[in-house]
Amino acid sequence: MKIRPATDMDCDAIWTIFHHVVAAGDTYALDPQMSREDALAYWFAPGTHTYVAEGDAVGDGVAVPGKPTASPTIIRAPQILGTYILRPNGSGGGSHVANAGFMVSAGARGKGIGRAMAKHCLNEARRLGFRAMQFNFVISTNTSAIRLWKQLSFGIVGTLPGAFRHPDKGYVDVYVMYRSLLD
Amino acid sequence: MKIRPATDMDCDAIWTIFHHVVAAGDTYALDPQMSREDALAYWFAPGTHTYVAEGDAVGDGVAVPGKPTASPTIIRAPQILGTYILRPNGSGGGSHVANAGFMVSAGARGKGIGRAMAKHCLNEARRLGFRAMQFNFVISTNTSAIRLWKQLSFGIVGTLPGAFRHPDKGYVDVYVMYRSLLD
């Protein structure tokens, strides 16, 4: 798997992942009906660094034009497995704190892609000179994310009571999570 | 003093207040060099409710055309003393929590204008159906704001260590403050 800056070529794949995550309405405080245009404007906003995690995917044995087809042809086409954004959480006196958001393709979950992107993100944030990273809105029911952030040394620094209306569980708490990036 | 929705006619006054507050760089995580265009786009963003506090100001005794001028004419012209915004803090499952921001004209501080706008804001937020209000970034050195929010039943629900670089005091903590709007 390779993690690299996203390009315009990745928009279709990013939108597929984004739409699936946001339409579920259980992990992000974003409109589940958000349009592709608004979603890509958000994910590629000015000042936002956008990345994708790319892995090899085994194709469906489609024949390649001009290539022998004596045996079923296996194509290993790169596939976008996840995407993340990294940006300043504020401007002015708040611009030394980074914020980030992560999304993994439904078919690629449980394979460490979120963790790999998070580690990449922490390195990128340090490289860009950020002194800390803050997640403003970690929904308390998103236990796999919380477990990962804790393993990566994020602490819960705030609890927002009932700040998220979960589609199944009703009003649930939300955490603010934070970690220093200084050694 | 009257608090009312802002109109395009208020843009000059709002920009004067906004620029003075933000250029100081000690209370908002906004770029102190923010342009008028960006400032007004932020203060009047889609989905944001924008208000002004208007008070009578004694004018300079300017003569009114067509009026007798036997005695010095006192004009009481409305003056914008402060401005605030009210908006959802998130979308989707987070849209029931309000966020707000307040700015008072430098010459009108210490006269209860911030408090009057805050009370107006809490009423407006209830009227609009919000269930809670959250301030994401209350800088710990802004003691007059913190005192006011505490008096208005906001609690500190999170502390962001060193999340603001104060122009004089260096890295200082930031509070997340929150209150329910349900009875």
Image: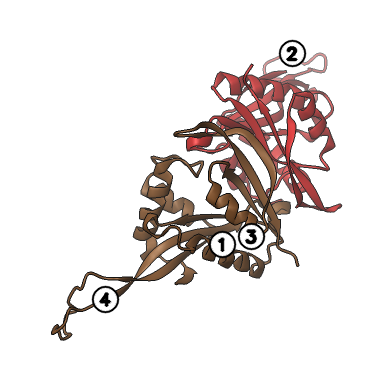
Chain colours: A red, B brown
Q: Earlier in the sequence, mark 3 or mark 4?
A: 4
The span from disc 2 to disc 3 (Cα, nearest Å) is 76 Å
Could you confirm whether marks 2 and 3 are on the same chain? no
| Residue B86, image x, y percentages | 57, 59
The span from disc 1 to disc 4 (Cα, nearest Å) is 29 Å
Q: Earlier in the sequence, mark 1 or mark 4?
A: 4
Amino acid at circle 4: Ile
Could you confirm whether marks 2 and 1 are on the same chain? no
Residue under label 2? A68
The span from disc 1 to disc 3 (Cα, nearest Å) is 8 Å
Protein chain holding label 4: B
Q: Quadrant of the N terminus of chain B?
A: bottom left
Circles 4 and 2 in contact, beta carbons < 8 Å: no
- Disc 3 on helix, strand or loop? loop
The span from disc 3 to disc 4 (Cα, nearest Å) is 36 Å
Circles 1 and 3 in contact, beta carbons < 8 Å: yes
Residue under label 1? B118
Res. B99 in view: no
Residue under label 3? B152
As drawn, the residue found furthest toward the right would be A169
Amino acid at circle 2: Pro
The answer to which quarter of the image holds residue B23 is top left
- Say whether residue A111 is left or right of residue A53: right
Would you call the spot at circle 1 few (<14 residues within 10 Å), some (14-19), or many (20 or more)?
some
Q: Earlier in the sequence, mark 1 or mark 3?
A: 1
- Disc 4 on helix, strand or loop? loop
Amino acid at circle 1: Ala
The span from disc 2 to disc 1 (Cα, nearest Å) is 74 Å
